[in-house]
Image: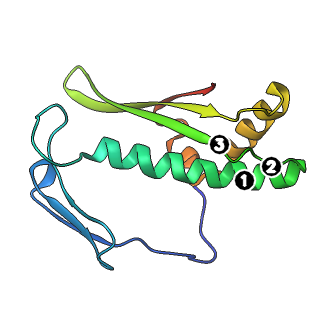
């Protein structure tokens, strides 16, 4: 298991009610109503929050990878993240797909950026070997 030498940031939230509840960050910047997926009720769910966090982090990791490779990412760089909640037997699991858009970047170079980012991104590290993950270049 990897160990942190220096903590750079700690996200703090307080959640009540689980999937039928409410979550708020300690700084008040995040304040969301939670609802189960597909319920039709107002609010978001943990899978959407995870997808948003991972895709944002992945773009940051691609920026770092691009610096190392001495290339510039296009301004339109984007990641579409899909996180599935599923069931296997009596247990619940996640799986994910990241579709990465790097318009105008050579496909071979884009693939290098994506692979390096997947090695750098803390979300990718946390999920590696734990859930099925597909990376696709749009």
Q: Earlier in the sequence, mark 2 or mark 3?
A: 2
Left of 57 or right of it: where is 43? Answer: left
The picture quadrant where one finds residue 6 is: bottom right
Q: Which residue is mark 3?
A: 76
Where residue 132 sits: x, y (%)? 48, 27
Q: Using the image as rendered, state which of residue 128 and residue 41 is in the foreground.
A: 41
Up-down relation of residue 114 to residue 64 (above or below): above
Against 58, residue 86 (above or below) is: above
Q: Residue at x 24, y 45 (%)?
A: 45
**Dot 2, crowdedness within 10 Å: few (<14), some or many (≥20)?**
many
As drawn, the label of residue 93 is: none
User: Which residue, given by chain and number where applicable, does mark 2 sit on?
Assistant: 66
Q: In the current view of this chain or complex, which residue is farthest to the top?
A: 89
| Secondary element at tag 1 | helix
Q: 66 or 77: nearer the eye?
A: 77
**For the point 80% across and 26% down, which residue is it?**
107
Quadrant occupied by the N terminus:
bottom right
Q: CA distance from mark 2 to mark 3?
A: 14 Å
Asked where in the image residue 102 lies, by quadrant, the reply is top right
Circle 3 Cα neighbour tier, 10 Å, few/some/many (<14 / 14–19 / ≥20): few
Q: Position of residue 125 (x, y in %)?
A: 58, 47
Q: Secondary structure at mark 2?
A: helix
Residue at 75 percent of width and 43 percent of height? 116
Q: Quadrant of residue 110?
A: top right
Q: Which residue is mark 1?
A: 63
**Count of numbered badges drawn on the protein:** 3
Q: CA distance from mark 2 to mark 1?
A: 5 Å
In x, y percent, where is residue 127? 50, 42
Taking the spot 75% from the left edge, 56% from the top edge, the residue there is: 64
Q: Tell me which label, 1 or 3, sits earlier in the chain.
A: 1
Is disc 3 placed on a helix, strand or loop? loop
């Amino acid at each position: 298991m990897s160990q942190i030498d220096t903590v750079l940031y700690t996200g703090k939230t307080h959640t009540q009610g689980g999937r039928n509840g409410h979550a708020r960050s300690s700084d008040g910047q995040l304040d969301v109503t939670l609802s189960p997926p597909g319920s039709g009720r107002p609010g978001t769910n943990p899978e959407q929050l995870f997808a948003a966090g991972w895709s944002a982090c992945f773009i940051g990791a691609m920026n770092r990878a691009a610096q190392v490779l001495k290339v510039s990412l296009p301004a339109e760089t984007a990641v579409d993240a899909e996180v599935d909640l599923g069931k296997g037997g009596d247990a619940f699991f996640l799986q994910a797909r990241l579709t990465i858009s790097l318009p105008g970047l050579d496909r071979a170079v884009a693939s290098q950026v994506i692979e390096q980012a997947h090695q750098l991104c803390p979300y990718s590290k946390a999920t590696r070997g734990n859930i099925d993950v597909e990376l696709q270049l749009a």
